[in-house]
């Protein structure tokens, strides 16, 4: 009897197109879910008859309570090599192998700049006006050249965002709890004296930190209040790093010029979520890692992981 594999959150219905799943045909039936399964009961019911689950990023939590309700589950394949919403101890206890895949940092770097440029030049408002017969020019763009880009985090993604900023002729500074002057010099940016100094002095602030106990709520009401009224905030990292209520209040009250957001406290966003209607907000539905090349890697290596598991020699095991 063939095993059954569930591919979760295949919103674009491309999982079986961007990679070759044919090597699994004889052994595995692949079922793609094009809508998000929300809540443990829904997941437990939908996945009860599956032996393998392929999940994207950290969209679907797999706590021990859910794993215990899936007695047929033998393998979870998660995109990327880090996933904070899978209970690895429970997986091991229930005999479930967890594997990951490679993941490119290029797509989130590019999306960060798409959001930043879209905000700076009012692209959405101007495009909508042009297409609907609205006013011819209603915004005055914010310049990048000569302005200051402040980066919270200077890791793999943050450093690449920094180099693009430098190419635009921006002054780039960075801060994180562990950032050293040597690392800042290596990338060619300034080390901000403090988080507060970076926020108060920057014209654009972009978040590139991993979510942890230290970074959760790192930008709260007091920190957001430090931003210039002409400043823009971009977050393509994790929603919980920025206090969502404080950000919404700043946008509604016009205390910052705007924000670009790709991550949210609830995903997918409910229809009545205030982020859907907030002013001065350019928002995208968590597209950071969504690119054809990245999907080809995710799903291509998912196939490799499943084949290796079936052969009794799992690869790319997590954690």
Image (spheres, helix red, strand yellow):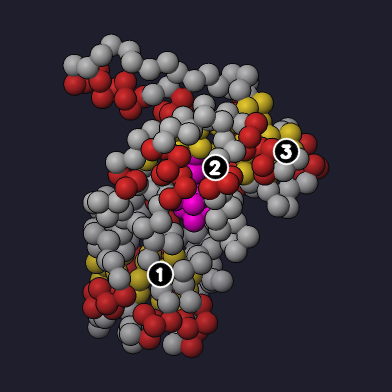
- According to the picture, the residue beneath numbered tag 2 turns out to be 224
For the N terminus, which image quadrant?
Answer: bottom left
Closest to the observer, 40 or 163 = 40
Image quadrant for the C terminus?
bottom right
Spatial distance from mark 3 to mark 1, Cα to Cα?
36 Å
Q: Residue furthest left?
A: 133
Viewer-nearest residue: 25 or 264: 264
Q: Which residues are magenta?
A: 234-244
Looking at the rendered structure, the secondary structure element under dot 1 is loop
User: In the picture provided, is 129 more to the left or to the right than 267?
Assistant: left
| Outermost right residue | 182
Question: Looking at the picture, how far across and down is residue 24, in whole percent?
Answer: 32, 68
Please give left or right for residue 272 compared with residue 256 in the image.
left
Q: Position of residue 201 (x, y in %)?
A: 65, 31
- The residue where tag 1 is placed is 61
Q: Nearer the viewer, residue 180 or 80?
A: 180
Q: Are marks 3 and 1 in contact (CB under 8 Å)?
A: no
User: Is residue 206 rendered magenta in the image?
Assistant: no
- Cα separation, mark 3 vs mark 2, equals 17 Å
Q: How many marks?
A: 3
Q: Position of residue 48 (x, y in %)?
A: 26, 80
């Amino acid at each position: 009897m063939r095993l059954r594999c569930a591919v979760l959150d295949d919103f674009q219905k491309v999982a079986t197109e961007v990679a070759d799943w044919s090597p699994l045909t004889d052994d595995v039936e692949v079922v793609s879910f094009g809508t998000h399964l929300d809540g443990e009961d829904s997941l437990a019911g939908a996945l009860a008859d599956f032996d393998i689950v392929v999940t994207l990023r950290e969209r679907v939590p797999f706590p021990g309570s859910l794993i215990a309700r899936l007695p047929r589950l033998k393998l979870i394949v998660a995109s990327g090599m880090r996933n904070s919403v899978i209970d690895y101890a429970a997986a091991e206890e229930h005999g479930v192998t967890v594997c990951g895949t490679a993941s490119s940092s290029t797509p989130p770097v590019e999306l960060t700049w798409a959001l930043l440029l879209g905000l700076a030049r009012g692209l959405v408002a101007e495009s909508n006006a042009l297409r609907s017969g609205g006013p011819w020019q209603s915004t005055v763009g914010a310049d990048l050249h000569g302005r200051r880009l402040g980066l919270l985090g200077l890791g793999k993604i943050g450093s690449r965002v920094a180099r693009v900023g430098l190419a635009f002729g921006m002054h780039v500074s960075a801060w994180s709890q562990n950032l050293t002057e040597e690392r800042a010099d290596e990338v060619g940016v300034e080390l901000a004296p403090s988080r507060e100094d970076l926020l108060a002095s920057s014209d654009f602030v972009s978040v590139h930190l991993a979510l942890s106990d230290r970074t959760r709520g790192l930008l709260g009401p007091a920190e957001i209040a430090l931003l210039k009224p002409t400043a823009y905030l971009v977050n393509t990292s994790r929603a919980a790093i920025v206090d969502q209520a404080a950000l919404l209040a700043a946008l509604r009250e016009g205390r910052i010029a705007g924000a670009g957001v790709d991550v949210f406290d609830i995903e997918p966003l409910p229809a009545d979520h205030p982020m859907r209607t907030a002013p001065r907000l350019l928002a995208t539905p968590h597209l950071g890692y969504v690119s054809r090349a990245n999907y080809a890697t995710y799903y291509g290596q998912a196939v490799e992981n499943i084949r290796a598991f079936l052969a009794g020699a799992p690869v790319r095991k997590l954690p």
